[in-house]
Image (tube, coloured by chain):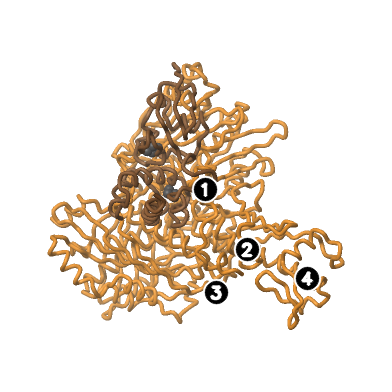
C-alpha cells in the first residue's frame, strides 16, 4: 500500500507522519500522534465520539482521510485546556455532571464549542437539535444539555 | 465529617478532569511493546457447516503473522466458554449447556460467530487478510423466530439439545393461582413482546493479550465489568493459565450496561494467541462487530393474565414466557429470564397468587444475556402493562388501581409469592410524590390543550421494583449460581495520612472514585483529594465480583465501609495507648479519637502515623494500618418508585414525542445525589430508547438487519424532554450504609410508562415496542 507524508497543524504545533492513502484522520491522531482523547464509537459517521475541529469548525475525524488534512489546522480535545486550567466548556461539563463514562465527552465538548461559535447563547431546543450528530449512552443527555448551556454562558462572560 | 465531601453531598467527580481533557485511559488507548493486531473472520451465515477453511493466501499477505483457527484451539486443548448458572427445569433436569468453542471449527450458529483470528503487524493488514481467508460453508436452515423455536419442524441449533430448549422453568404456586383465577370477577389478558435490544456502550469491546515467557504468565487487558470473574473463567474452565499466572486488567471503560460482564470468544482467542505468536495481540471491536457479537438483551414473547376481584384487588397473576437465548448460553444468560425475572413478578403489589413459567430456547441469533436491568425490566413491563389493561377494562384510574393494591409501608419485611423477601420501602409515598411532580391532576387540561393543537396526549405510569445488590451467596448458590456474589475492599492508609482503596467494584461511568472517596472521607476524615480508588486490576485488588445489577454501592460500598470500621477499631487501641486510657473510654467521631468527658484527643491521621512508626505503641499490636473486608449481603436490596410519562402523538404520522417525565425513586440512603440523579437520567433514556426506537431485527435467514447506527435507532438528545426526578429515602435495614443502588432503575421503569402513555393517548389496549411512528399509526388506524 502506498504511503504519503502528511503535514498539518495539530493543537498549534506542526506535525507530520507517514500514512496510507486510506488512513483516517482519527487513526492518524490516535496512532501516529498518540492523541487518544479523540475516540472511535462507530464505523458509519453517526456517533460523534471522534469530533475534532478543522480550521475552527467541527468535523468527524473518522470521515476524513489524513491526506485530506494536509496543511490544515486541527484542534483536538487535548488542545482545549490551557495547561491544567480547564476551558469554561470543560469546566461546565464537570460542574454539571455532563459525563459519566467519559467516552463521548471529548466529541461532545468539541461539538459544543463549535455550536457556541455558531449560536452564542443556544436555547435548550437548539442545543438538543445541534447534538444530533453526537451519541451518549450514559447520561440521557439531560446534563450534557445543561453543561453546554452553562458553558456557553461562561464563555460569553469571559469574552 | 466535612459536609462538603461527606455522605449526602453532591461532590463534583474527581475522575472528570482526565475525561474532559482527553486523558482517559480506555482500552484502545493502550499499546504494548511489540504488539500485533488481531481481526476475526466471522460467519456471514446464521447456520452452516464449515466444509473447509483455506488460509493459504491470507497467510502470505503483507504483514500477516499467523492465521489461527478452531483446529489450533482444539489442538492446544483450550476449553470452551461456559454459562455459570444452572437453572433447573420443572422436571428437575439441568440447563442444557451446549459446547461453545471460542472459534467455531465445525458449525457456525449465528451471523458473527468467529471462525478464525488473523494476526498481523497492523490492524488494516489483519483486516485485509481476514477478507482473503476462504471459508467453504454448507448453508443450513436457520431458526430465527423464537415463538416457534421449540415446535416441531424448527431448525435445531445444537444437536444435543432437544427442541432447542435450554430449560423449561417455573416459579410460584400453580394451584393457588388457578384457584385465584377461578374466583376472579375479571381477568385481564395480554400478549406482548419485549423487544430485543443491543447494549451499545459507546466504547466497543477490546482486548490485548500478553504473554511473558520469563515467568510463564499472562496479562489480559480487557473491557470487563468484573475482571476477577474473567480470570476465574479463563483459568478454571478455558484453561488459559492458572489464576496466579493470569492477570486481568480492565482500565477506564466507556460504559458497560451488562455487555462487558461476560467472557466472550474474542478475548479468549486473543489471550491464547498472544502466547502462540509470542507477541502481545490487540483486538478492538468495530461497531458492526459490536452489534453482531455483544450479547443482546430482553427478547421475550409473553402471555400474561391478571385476575381481579370486584373491588379491583389483584387476586392472581399468570405469566407464560418464551425467552430467546440466542445461539449459545452466554456467561449468565440462564439466570436472566428466570431468577432475575420470575422473582420480580410480585411488583409493588399484594397479588395473592402468582405462577410463571419460562421456556428458554436457542435460536440462530446472537447470544442474549443481561442488559441494563436484566430480567427486571421484562418483569416490570409485564406487570405494569397488564395493570393498565385491567384499568382500561374496568374503567378505573390506573394510579388508583395501583394504589389500591400496593404493599403498605408497615408490611415489611414482606414475603412475596415468588421467593423474595422485600426488606423495606414506601410505595404509596413514592407514587404520591411522583404524581405531584407530574401534576397528574392537571393532565386533563393538558390533554385538551394538546387536542386543540391536533395532538393526542397520553399519560402513563410505571411503579417498578427491582432486586439489586446481587446477592447473598448462599441464596444464589441454592438457585444454581456457580459463584458467590460478595465483594472485597481493602483500605490502605499511608504513613502520611493519605488512603488508597482497592476494590472489586468496577467503575465505567458510575463515578466510584468520587462516591467511594466520600464514604472513606465521611468516616475517617481523610481529605477527599487524598483518597485514591483503585479498581479493575486483579494484580492489585482483592478478589471481587465486579459491577452489575446495581451492586457497586450496595455490596462494594458496604465492603468498603466494613474495612473502614476495622481500621477505626485498630486505631482505637493505638489511641487508647497514646492517651493512656482504656479502649472503652475512647470515642471516635469525625476522624478523631477522644476521651469521653475530657479534651484529650488524637486524630486518625496521627494514629495512622503511629501505626507505621510504632515507637510508642501498644504491646502485641501489629504495626501498619490496612484492612480488607469481604461483604456478603444478607438479602437483596429493593429500590422502587414510580415514573410518570407524558407523550404527544401526531395522529397524521404516528410520531410520538415524550413531552414530560417525572419520577420519584427510593434508593435508600444516597451518598452523592448528583451522581444518583445522573444514573436515573441515563436509565430513563435507555428505557425510552427501548420503548420508542431500539430493536434488533433479523430477517428470515438470520441476517442482522440492524448492525449499524444507520439501521439501529439510538436515542439522541432531541428524543427527550427535560426530566424531573426526585427521591424518597427509606434506608436499607440490612446493610451498614442503608443504600440500595440506582443504576438500573430508569431502564426498568421507563418502557411500560412510555407504552402506557401511548396506549392512553390512542385509547388502545396495546402497542408493541419499539413504538415506531408506523406501529402507532397502524394502531390508530386499525
Ligand atoms: S467514530 Fe462515530 S462518528 Fe466518527
Ligand atoms: S458519558 Fe458515557 S457515552 Fe456519554
Q: Position of residue B396 (x, y in %)?
A: 24, 75
The residue beneath circle 3 is B733
Judge: label 4 CB < 8 Å from ligand 2: no
Judge: label 2 CB < 8 Å from ligand 2: no
User: Left or right: where does residue B48 sit relative to residue B480?
Assistant: left
Q: Foreground: B174 or B213?
A: B213
What secondary structure is marked by label 3? loop
Q: Colour of chain B?
A: orange
- Chain label for disc 4: B
Q: Do marks 4 and 3 share a subunit?
A: yes
Q: Nearer the viewer, mark 1 or mark 2?
A: 1
For the residues labelled 4 and 3, the Cα–Cα distance comes to: 31 Å
The residue beneath circle 2 is B520
Image marks 1 and 4: residues in contact by CB distance under 8 Å: no
Q: Foreground: B115 or B776?
A: B776
Could you tell me if residue B359 is visible in this image?
A: no
Residue B575 is labelled as: 4
Judge: label 3 CB < 8 Å from ligand 2: no
For marks 3 and 2, the one nearer the N-term is: 2
Residue under the point 33% across and 71% down: B437
The residue beneath circle 1 is A85
**What is the letter of the brown chain?**
A
Q: Do marks 2 and 4 share a subunit?
A: yes
Q: Do marks 1 and 4 share a subunit?
A: no
Amino acid at each position: 500500500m502506498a504511503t504519503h507524508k502528511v503535514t498539518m497543524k495539530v493543537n498549534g504545533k506542526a506535525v507530520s507522519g507517514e500514512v496510507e492513502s486510506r488512513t483516517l484522520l482519527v487513526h492518524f491522531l490516535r496512532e501516529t500522534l498518540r492523541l487518544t482523547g479523540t475516540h472511535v464509537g462507530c464505523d458509519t459517521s453517526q456517533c460523534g465520539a471522534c469530533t475534532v475541529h478543522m480550521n475552527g469548525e467541527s468535523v468527524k475525524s473518522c470521515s476524513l482521510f489524513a491526506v485530506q488534512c494536509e496543511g490544515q489546522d486541527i484542534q483536538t480535545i487535548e488542545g482545549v485546556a490551557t495547561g491544567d486550567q480547564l476551558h469554561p466548556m470543560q469546566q461546565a461539563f464537570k460542574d454539571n455532571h455532563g459525563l459519566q463514562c467519559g467516552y463521548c465527552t471529548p466529541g461532545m465538548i468539541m461539538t459544543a464549542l463549535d455550536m457556541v461559535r455558531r449560536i452564542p447563547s443556544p436555547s435548550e431546543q437548539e442545543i438538543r437539535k445541534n447534538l444530533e450528530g453526537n451519541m451518549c449512552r450514559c447520561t440521557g443527555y439531560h446534563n450534557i444539555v445543561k453543561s453546554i448551556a452553562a458553558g456557553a454562558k461562561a464563555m460569553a462572560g469571559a469574552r | 465529617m466535612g459536609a462538603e465531601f461527606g455522605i449526602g453531598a453532591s461532590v463534583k467527580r474527581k475522575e472528570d478532569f482526565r475525561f474532559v481533557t482527553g486523558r482517559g485511559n480506555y482500552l484502545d488507548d493502550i499499546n504494548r511493546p511489540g504488539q500485533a493486531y488481531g481481526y476475526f473472520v466471522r460467519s456471514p451465515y446464521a447456520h452452516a457447516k464449515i466444509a473447509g477453511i483455506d488460509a493459504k493466501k491470507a497467510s502470505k499477505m503483507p504483514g500477516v503473522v499467523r492465521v489461527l483457527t478452531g483446529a489450533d484451539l482444539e489442538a492446544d486443548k483450550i476449553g470452551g466458554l461456559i454459562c455459570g448458572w444452572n437453572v433447573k427445569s420443572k422436571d428437575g433436569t439441568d440447563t442444557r449447556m451446549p459446547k461453545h468453542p471460542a472459534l467455531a471449527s465445525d458449525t457456525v450458529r449465528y451471523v458473527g460467530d468467529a471462525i478464525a483470528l488473523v494476526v498481523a503487524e497492523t490492524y488494516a493488514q489483519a483486516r485485509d487478510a481476514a477478507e482473503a481467508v476462504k471459508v467453504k460453508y454448507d448453508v443450513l436452515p436457520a431458526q430465527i423466530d423464537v415463538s416457534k423455536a421449540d415446535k416441531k419442524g424448527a431448525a435445531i441449533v445444537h444437536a444435543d439439545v432437544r427442541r432447542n430448549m435450554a430449560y423449561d422453568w417455573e416459579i410460584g404456586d400453580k394451584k393457588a393461582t388457578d384457584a385465584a383465577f377461578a374466583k376472579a370477577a375479571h381477568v385481564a389478558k395480554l400478549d406482548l413482546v419485549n423487544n430485543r435490544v443491543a447494549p451499545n456502550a459507546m466504547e466497543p469491546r477490546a482486548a490485548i493479550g500478553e504473554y511473558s515467557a520469563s515467568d510463564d504468565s499472562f496479562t489480559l487487558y480487557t473491557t470487563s465489568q468484573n475482571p476477577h470473574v474473567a480470570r476465574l473463567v479463563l483459568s478454571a474452565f478455558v484453561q488459559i493459565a492458572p489464576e496466579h499466572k493470569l492477570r486481568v486488567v480492565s482500565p477506564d471503560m466507556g460504559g458497560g450496561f451488562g455487555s462487558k460482564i461476560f467472557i466472550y470468544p474474542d478475548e479468549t482467542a486473543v489471550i491464547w494467541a498472544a502466547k502462540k505468536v509470542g507477541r502481545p495481540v490487540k483486538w478492538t471491536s468495530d461497531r458492526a462487530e459490536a452489534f453482531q457479537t455483544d450479547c443482546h438483551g430482553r427478547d421475550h414473547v409473553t402471555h400474561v393474565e391478571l385476575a381481579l376481584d370486584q373491588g379491583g384487588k389483584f387476586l392472581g397473576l399468570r405469566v407464560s414466557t418464551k425467552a430467546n437465548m440466542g445461539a449459545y448460553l452466554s456467561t449468565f444468560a440462564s439466570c436472566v429470564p428466570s431468577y432475575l425475572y420470575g422473582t420480580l413478578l410480585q411488583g409493588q403489589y399484594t397479588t395473592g397468587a402468582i405462577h410463571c413459567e419460562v421456556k428458554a430456547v436457542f435460536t440462530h441469533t446472537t447470544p442474549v444475556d443481561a442488559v441494563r436491568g436484566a430480567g427486571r425490566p421484562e418483569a416490570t413491563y409485564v406487570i405494569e402493562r397488564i395493570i393498565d389493561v385491567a384499568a382500561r377494562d374496568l374503567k378505573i384510574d390506573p394510579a388508583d388501581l395501583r394504589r389500591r393494591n400496593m404493599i403498605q409501608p408497615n408490611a415489611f419485611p414482606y414475603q412475596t409469592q415468588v421467593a423474595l423477601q422485600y426488606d423495606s420501602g414506601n410505595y404509596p409515598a413514592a407514587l404520591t410524590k411522583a404524581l405531584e411532580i407530574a401534576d397528574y391532576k392537571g393532565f386533563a387540561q393538558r390533554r385538551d390543550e394538546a387536542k386543540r393543537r391536533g395532538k393526542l396526549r397520553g399519560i402513563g405510569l410505571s411503579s417498578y421494583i427491582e432486586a439489586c445488590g446481587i446477592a447473598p451467596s448462599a441464596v444464589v448458590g441454592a438457585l444454581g449460581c456457580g459463584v458467590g456474589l460478595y465483594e472485597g475492599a481493602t483500605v490502605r492508609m499511608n504513613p502520611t495520612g493519605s488512603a488508597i482503596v482497592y476494590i472489586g467494584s468496577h467503575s465505567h461511568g458510575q463515578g466510584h472514585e468520587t462516591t467511594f472517596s466520600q464514604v472513606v472521607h465521611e468516616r475517617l476524615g481523610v481529605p477527599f483529594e487524598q483518597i485514591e480508588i483503585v479498581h479493575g486490576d486483579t494484580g492489585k485488588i482483592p478478589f471481587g465480583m465486579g459491577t452489575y445489577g446495581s451492586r457497586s454501592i450496595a455490596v462494594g460500598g458496604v465492603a468498603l465501609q466494613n474495612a473502614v470500621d476495622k481500621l477505626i477499631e485498630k486505631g482505637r487501641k493505638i489511641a487508647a495507648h497514646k492517651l493512656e486510657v482504656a479502649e472503652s473510654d475512647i470515642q471516635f467521631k469525625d476522624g478523631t479519637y477522644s476521651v469521653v468527658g475530657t479534651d484529650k484527643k488524637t486524630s486518625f491521621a496521627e494514629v495512622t502515623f503511629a501505626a507505621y512508626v510504632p515507637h510508642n505503641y501498644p504491646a502485641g499490636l501489629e504495626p501498619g494500618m490496612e484492612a480488607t473486608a469481604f461483604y456478603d449481603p444478607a438479602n437483596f436490596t429493593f429500590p422502587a418508585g414510580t415514573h410518570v410519562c407524558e407523550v404527544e402523538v401526531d395522529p397524521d404520522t404516528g410520531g410520538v414525542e415524550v413531552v414530560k417525565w417525572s419520577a420519584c425513586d427510593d434508593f435508600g440512603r444516597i451518598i452523592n445525589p448528583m451522581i444518583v440523579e445522573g444514573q436515573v437520567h441515563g436509565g430513563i433514556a435507555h428505557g425510552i430508547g427501548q420503548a420508542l426506537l431500539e430493536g434488533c431485527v433479523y430477517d428470515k435467514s438470520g441476517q442482522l438487519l440492524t448492525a449499524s447506527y444507520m439501521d439501529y435507532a439510538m436515542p439522541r438528545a432531541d428524543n427527550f424532554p427535560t426530566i424531573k426526578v426526585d427521591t424518597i429515602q427509606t434506608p436499607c435495614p440490612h446493610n451498614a450504609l442503608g443504600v440500595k443502588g440506582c443504576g438500573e432503575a430508569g431502564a426498568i421503569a421507563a418502557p411500560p410508562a412510555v407504552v402506557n402513555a401511548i396506549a392512553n393517548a390512542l385509547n388502545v389496549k396495546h402497542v408493541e415496542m419499539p413504538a415506531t411512528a408506523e406501529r402507532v399509526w397502524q394502531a390508530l388506524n386499525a
